[in-house]
């Protein structure tokens, strides 16, 4: 449990960094803070002293306590200490190391350092990461949005970066509430091509596994529906299995149930990504469903999983390292004063054949 003075510090710091308390604004009096937090005056004074030492507050005798601009004085003023912050949903697995490698290589060319944080696709952790970046005073920021298909409660922090003229770009997805440059795979086209490939192989009973709290999942579902419509195939909601970050740990159980219930109705599946494709393979092994003889599957993102899976997974390309490099290049060029930089960049996907798709024999 946090000490009471630390609770006050965290709350006031959040209000300052998000812009709720503006630079130069007087914060509530000690008496008001005592009442608000239900603590002693000594506890309030200890919190104010800590915040003043961090450069977030300044006290004027006989007047009150005000938000200081000192915390905005970045440590990176010299070329040797310039820093770009990077916030991703995950760090240690899947495609993220390749994206970060692309960012690092581009930053290294202009002697920028990288400050890395991850959110585990949790908005509370995203808030902490944004506060860390604002406190540190990064020169620029690259963000992979958290739960990008849902309302984000941290918008005020992004607006604080804008107010401080700190350039930032987003990768893999973006928040519609913000006017922000982004670098994304064309997710609609990715799932469209996957579905169209299965249709071209004679499949008409095609299901979808979709992650619905991220914008990629929403757009990949759109591509799946588009391909079905063009082929005059009916969209069957019974052949859709959706999940989100919270329910992902139960995906294996959900897949077992889904495949049992639809074993006779399904001949193919479009998977949200390669990681889900591997989950489907494992479920099929448990249920003794032969891939691709009984069920064809296609992943997406061309991750290491597609190459190292027990059966080489058919998948779609993802720019990974190039995306990271391009986002870093955009931030650096913005800091260098370059004009007319692209506001968006969609990367076209391409199909990578594997061993998990079977051509249906039409009798």
Image: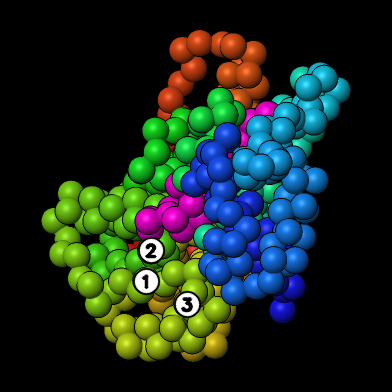
- Report whether 4 appears left or right of 189: right
Residue at 77% from the left image edge and 60% from the top image edge: 46
Q: Residue furthest front?
A: 62
Q: What stretch is highlighted in magenta?
A: 135-155
The vertical placement of 225 against 66, above or below, is: below
**In contact (CB < 8 Å): disc 1 and disc 2:** yes
* Residue 136 image position (x, y, % from top left): 73, 40
Asked which colour scheme the image uses, the reply is: rainbow
- Report whether 20 appears left or right of 9: left
Marked residue nearer the N-terminal end (3 or 1): 1
Mark 3 lies on a secondary structure that is loop
- 143 is within the stretch colored magenta: yes
Mark 1 lies on a secondary structure that is strand
Task: Tell me the CA gap for discs 1 and 2.
Answer: 6 Å
Position of the C terminus, as image quadrant, is: bottom left
On residue 105, the disc is none
- Report whether 38 appears left or right of 345: right
Q: Nearer the viewer, mark 3 or mark 1?
A: 3
On residue 242, the disc is 1
Residue at 19% from the left image edge and 65% from the top image edge: 235
The quadrant holding residue 63 is top right
Marked residue nearer the N-terminal end (2 or 3): 2
The vertical placement of 79 against 57, above or below, is: above
Residue tagged 2: 212
* Residue 1 image position (x, y, % from top left): 72, 79
Q: Residue furthest right?
A: 80
Task: Tell me the CA gap for discs 2 and 3.
Answer: 11 Å
């Amino acid at each position: 449990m946090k000490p009471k003075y630390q609770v006050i510090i965290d709350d006031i710091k959040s209000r300052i960094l998000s812009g709720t308390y503006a630079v130069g604004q007087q914060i509530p009096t000690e008496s008001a803070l005592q009442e608000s937090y239900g603590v002693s005056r000594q506890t309030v004074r200890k919190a104010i002293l800590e915040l003043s030492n961090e450069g977030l507050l300044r006290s004027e005798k006989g007047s009150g306590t005000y938000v200081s601009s000192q915390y905005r004085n970045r440590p990176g003023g010299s070329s040797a200490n310039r820093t770009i912050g990077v916030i991703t949903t995950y760090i240690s697995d899947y495609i993220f190391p390749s994206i970060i490698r692309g960012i690092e290589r581009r930053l290294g060319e202009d002697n920028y350092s990288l400050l890395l944080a991850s959110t585990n696709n949790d908005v509370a952790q995203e808030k902490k990461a944004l506060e860390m970046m604002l406190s540190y005073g990064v020169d620029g920021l690259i963000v992979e949005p958290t739960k990008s298909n849902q309302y984000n409660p941290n918008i005020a922090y992004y607006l604080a970066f804008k107010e401080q003229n700190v350039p930032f770009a987003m990768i893999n997805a973006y928040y519609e509430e913000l006017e922000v440059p982004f670098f994304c795979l064309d997710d609609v086209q990715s799932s469209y091509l996957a579905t169209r490939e299965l249709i071209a192989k004679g499949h008409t009973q095609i299901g979808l596994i979709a992650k619905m709290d991220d914008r990629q999942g929403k757009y990949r579902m759109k591509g799946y529906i588009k391909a079905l419509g063009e082929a005059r195939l009916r969209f069957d909601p019974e052949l859709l299995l959706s999940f989100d970050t919270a329910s992902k740990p139960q995906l294996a159980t959900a897949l077992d149930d889904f495949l049992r219930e639809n074993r006779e109705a399904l001949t193919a599946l479009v998977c949200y990504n390669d990681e889900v494709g591997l989950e489907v393979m494992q479920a099929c092994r448990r249920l003794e469903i032969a891939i691709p003889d009984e069920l064809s599957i296609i992943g997406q993102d061309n991750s290491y999983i597609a190459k190292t899976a027990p059966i080489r997974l058919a998948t779609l390309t993802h720019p990974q390292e190039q995306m990271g490099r391009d986002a870093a290049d955009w931030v650096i060029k913005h800091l260098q004063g370059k004009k007319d930089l692209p506001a968006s960049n969609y990367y076209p996907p391409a199909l990578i054949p594997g061993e998990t798709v079977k051509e249906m024999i039409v009798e």
